[in-house]
Image (cartoon, helix red, strand yellow):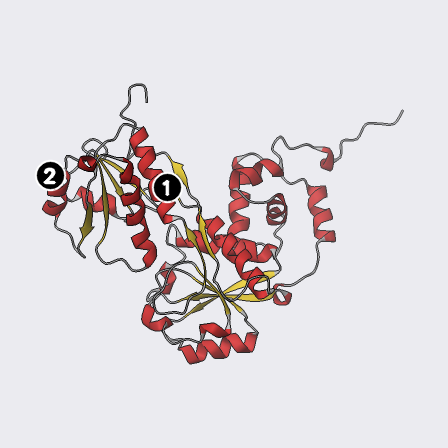
Amino acid sequence: MRESVSSTSEVRNQTSQREIANRLGVSIATVSMALRDHPRIPVATRERVKRMADEMGYRLTPDLQSLSNYSRPKRQPSKLLPLAWINAWSQPGKLAKHPEYGGYWRGACEAASQMGYYLEEFRLHPKTTQKELKRQLRAKGFRGLLLPPDGDPAALKGFPWEKYHVVSLSHYTTTPATHWVAPDCVGNCSLAFGMMRSRGYQRIGFLTDQFPQTINDKLSVVGFISAQLDLAESERLPVFLTQEHPLPHQLSQWVACHHLDAILTDLPDASLLLKRTGLRIPQDVGLAFTGSSRGVASTGIDCNPEEVGRIAIETLKKAIGGYLNQEPKVRIAVNGHWRDGRTLPSRLEGG
């Protein structure tokens, strides 16, 4: 009688790669390649997939790992087509650490690797001149550029952008018009306002910066004002524009004068600003964000930053391939979704 032998490859995982992909919002192919350390998948993505796999109890069986190593294509990153990420921040190392813009980078890197490209960062500060940037781009054959938000306008002004295919992740006034992919600031703000009202908040004010760096920052204000159009005029509240260093009593007076029960903001550090006034969140006033925030348990809009990065690469690929006209420029606003948190508990009974 033949003995029954249990092969390692026959051991079944209770968790599938599809479940991991759904949890992370990536493709099954990305999960599969990341678990096998495929060079086309960015290191950060590989680590993120492996962490999730460990949390969900997934294990790649040894036999399948060996087969993967045998059959993996020997394609090297050097054979992929190059795309450039132009980092014009005065402190360039902080860009990837930004809670929202870092997501743009991660999403763009992952999408580029899946589409046969690789994304290389070029830092204009503190040493790279425009002349040197042009030399490097020409030497390596770069045709497509991604322009992340909040770069130094002076560093970007005067560069021959028209010689490249460019997708910007923000509005810039110092560069020619480019294709544009960014969060839907107007729609996201309107969504947040409606969700706050549905949780029982009636007196909602908007807190923003008096000196917005890009047009994107102004669009949130447009969203807030348009969201109030359905209210009676007496219920519409003004926007509070902060100074560079707002005084605590100015914020507390604004809250008291308009009897605010909640604040909507596009400032990531709003929690800290309000804390200096002595206001307690959420006991004294609820707080929601239209985008990224410094608090991990904050309520508001998740702008889907990795999806923004992915769509930016997709748009850039179409431009390079000749599937987009140079004029008019494409504008894509990516919808966000609501995330619950501790800064805006429901005020409704049973909520």
Whether residue 82 is situated above or below residue 209 in the rendered picture: below
The answer to whether residue 140 shows anywhere in this view is: yes
Question: Is 236 left or right of 144, judged from the image as shown?
Answer: left
- Image spot of residue 27 (x, y percent): 59, 45
Report, in whole angstroms, how far the alpha carbon at label 2 lies from the one at label 1: 27 Å
Q: Residue at x 71, y 57 (%)?
A: 73
Tag 2–tag 1 contact (CB < 8 Å) = no
Which residue is labeled 2 in the image?
Answer: 257
Earlier sequence position, callout 2 versus callout 1: 2
2 or 1: mark nearer the eye: 2
Give the amino acid at mark 2: Cys
Residue at the far top: name it. Answer: 350
Rendered image quadrant of residue 60: top right
Which residue is labeled 1 in the image?
Answer: 301
- Image spot of residue 236 (x, y percent): 21, 39
- Image spot of residue 7 (x, y percent): 75, 35
Task: State which quarter of the image contains the C terminus.
Answer: top left
Question: Is 315 left or right of 240, judged from the image as shown?
Answer: right
Give the amino acid at mark 1: Ile
- The secondary element bearing badge 1 is classed as strand
